[in-house]
Image: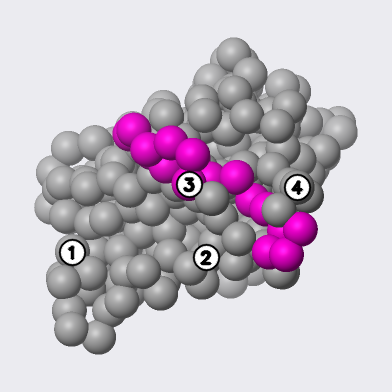
Amino acid sequence: MRVVGLGKVVSWNHVVFKLPDNWEVTSEGGSRFNGIIVAAPEKGGKLEIYWRRSSGKKYWREHERYVDKLVKRGFERRSRFKVSIKGHEAFEDVLINGNVKVFVTTWYCDETNRLFIVQMDGEKVSQSIFSEVLNSINCHPGDKGVVDWRLMGIGLRLYTDYFLLDRIFKIGYSMAYFMSRDKKVHVIQYSIPKYVHSSISFRAEDTWKRHAKMLIPKFTVLDLISRNNYSTYIIRHRFIKSIKYGYLLSKIDECKKPNYIQYTLVKTDSKRLEEACSIIGNTLCVEW
């Protein structure tokens, strides 16, 4: 398996890890409490990271049950040993079935009350790659009250109480919608590759308006009040201009390697305007 560095950073649903440069995230799902991320190289392997809420009691039994299922599928257990993942004791098993190898590691993160199971399998996977990926995992980021979100063109730094409301990842388009716990601040970020952005059929203004409508109430208008690194609008009632619904902040970033355009929209009330400014000022250009 050809590996070109371990430089691709993924930070999603409060799980951070690094991948080899030639690996791609193929799917993700769930929330920060119960979720999955799947990644793979061009061929010959697959990485799966699972997590779920847990009390942590006797988590090794969860590991044993998981390994037993692999044994029932015909895999032979070759070895078991203990490793450390971000300060947590973990169990690791190595299994083989013909040319296919499976590495499985399980641990409990008492910082976030989540059980983690990581599996790498395939004909071309190696113990060294698996160990490098495991050593890069941070299962409890956000110790300073903020956490990064980095995945396929989405790059933000948010307070830890924000949660992911919706997301879409497909060829030529990535979008994520976040919300603060008290629902006072809403954040939408979407990214468009340059080749799509420059195509005749793509209309940037219409796409921006479609996303803005997801944040602002009906029968409102946007009054531009400032434009620096980002634009700030007051959201007003269309007919009664004295009625205000807060602020909308909008920013456009041109990202390189890969080349794409990143749009960020933040809706907030007046009391959280400073927080919204901090969010839109800390957008991140990331790997696609």
* SS type, badge 4: loop
User: Can residue 122 be seen by looking at this rendering?
Assistant: no
Q: Looking at the image, do the residues carrying marks 1 and 4 touch, with CB atoms under 8 Å apart? A: no
Q: Is residue 4 left or right of residue 272?
A: left
Report the quarter where the N terminus lies: bottom left
Rounded to the nearest angstrom, the CA distance separating label 2 from label 1 is 19 Å
| Relative image position of residue 270 (x, y in whole percent) | 70, 32
Image quadrant where residue 142 sits: top right
Q: Which mark is residue 121?
A: none
**Residue on which disc 3 sits:** 224
Residue range (magenta): 224-240
**Residue on which disc 2 sits:** 211
Mark 2: amino acid: His
3 or 4: tag closer to the N-terminus:
3
Question: Magenta-highlighted stretch: main secondary structure?
Answer: strand
Mark 4: give few (<14), some (14-19) or many (20+) Cα within 10 Å. few
Q: Which mark is residue 242?
A: 4
1 or 4: tag closer to the N-terminus:
1
Rounded to the nearest angstrom, the CA distance separating label 4 from label 2 is 25 Å
2 or 1: tag closer to the N-terminus:
1
Camera-nearest label, 1 or 3: 3
**Residue on which disc 1 sits:** 194
Report the quarter where the C terminus lies: bottom left
